[in-house]
Image: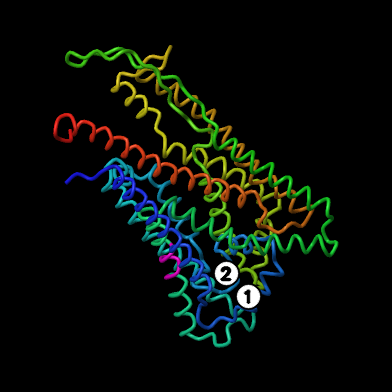
Amino acid sequence: MAKGPASTNNSGMSELKQRLLFLLGALIVFRIGSFVPVPGIDSTVLQQMLDQQSGNLLAMFNMFSGGALERASVFALGIMPYISASIIIQIMGFVDDRLKQLKKEGESGRQKLNQYTRYLTLALATVQAIGISMNLPAMLPGIVPNPNFAFYFGAVVSLVTGTMFLMWLGEQINERGIGNGISMLIFAGIVAGLPGAIGGTVEQARTGELHVLALMGIAALIIVVTFFVVWVERGQRRIVVNYAKRQQGRKVFAAQSSHLPLKVNMAGVIPAIFATAIIMFPGSIMQWIGQGNEDLGWLRDITVQLQPGNPLYIILYAIGIIFFCFFYTALTMNPRETADNLKKSGAFIPGIRPGEQTSKYIDKVMTRLTLAGALYVTFVCLMPEFLILFTQVPFYFGGTSLLIIVVVVMDFMAQVQSHLMSRNYDSVLKKANFKNYGAAGQIR
């Protein structure tokens, strides 16, 4: 028996509810896990150290992990080893012939690349976990009451397992939830710290450490930057595309006009996350190792220069954002492939020859858009760095955090709307089929 439009609506809503509930459940599990401690560590000592070093790389690391680092949680490493592994595999895909071939093999090749990423994540997380656990007792006396083999083994296993679980959880959100799983986990970690950051800022204003006018200016700036991010993220360059008149059998299709939409920021929030990971991963390792060793003073000097607000950090961060904007756009948008698809469908850009000339034209437009998008992301991410230096605002109000929050929320809303539109579209088709059913006695 055929299902009616009402049942189609209900099934569509049921799927959306299931995805939303799964996402909510996954984020709850993430928050609960951030409170599960690594055995053998006194988290109060670690929290005191992080409180004294607010605004540095470890504080940023703690922010992305949702406070798991300061609580010495099994999720303390966060998702950064996975992001670092993804960057390495994607870059290697341009230089290694075997990986290049896998990228051309469709779904099977993608699954193989994902498997390589998981293996590399395991290796990076293991190296980072060993380095942290081995240097903790020397760096912070009293943080590990019994620094024996059982502690080292348990700490490494706990930290690596936590990272691998977060990687798996992110993949599950991709498949069964809504939004990008990794971005959602980072978003949840940032949002979890917002109440404390807002409370700390208000307390600074109450005690006189931060002038009330400065507080109002900061709030106004956050609102303005948020509107600016939304405005740019919705911006598109629409390339006019015409379809020539064609005949199929006895039917003649009239010429049509459409457009090829190209976003200003096609890479989204990925460049900011990747650039942060590139600086955080080696920087945090150097900070953990160098702080407890007198013979590694040069390592501590480099670490100091990599702290937020320093010229070296700002320069490397800006270069990283611009590089990954172009890099990620090249991964997701292929001008030659787009030009070939337009040619096969009988479409053309007015004034541009189909094929190679169309590919060059699209590439030229994409390059200009990507440059504008890269400068926009760099501006949003680095502008608050100077604000932090002069006003001592909590690090949660950094541009990277704001960009991630706004873009992830916009992406989430777009995907929810897409599910709703898909459900309505199916409903319209069903209604049309039911009309045919009444006339011809069957659903066509």
Which quadrant holds the C terminus?
A: top left
Secondary structure type for disc 2: loop
Q: Position of residue 43 (x, y in %)?
A: 60, 78
Q: Which residue is mark 1?
A: 46
Q: Which residues lie in the magenta part?
A: 161-166
Secondary structure type for disc 1: helix
Q: Position of residue 434 (x, y in %)?
A: 23, 35
Inter-mark Cα distance, 2 to 1? 8 Å
Tell me the kind of residue under disc 2. Leu
Q: Position of residue 71 (x, y in %)?
A: 58, 73
Could you say which is closer to the camera, residue 229 or residue 372? 229
Could you say which is closer to the camera, residue 53 or residue 178? 178
Q: Which residue is mark 2?
A: 69
Main SS class of the magenta portion in the image = helix
Decide which of tag 2 and tag 1 comes sooner along the chain.
1
The image quarter containing residue 354 is top left
> Would you say 84 lies left or right of 105 here?
right
Q: How many marks?
A: 2
**Where is 37 relative to 19, above or below?**
below
**Where is 294 relative to 267, above or below?**
below
Is there a contact, CB below 8 Å, between mark 2 and mark 1?
A: yes
- At x 41%, y 34%, the residue is 333
The image quarter containing residue 259 is top left
Q: For residue 238: magenta? A: no
Q: Position of residue 145 (x, y in %)?
A: 58, 87
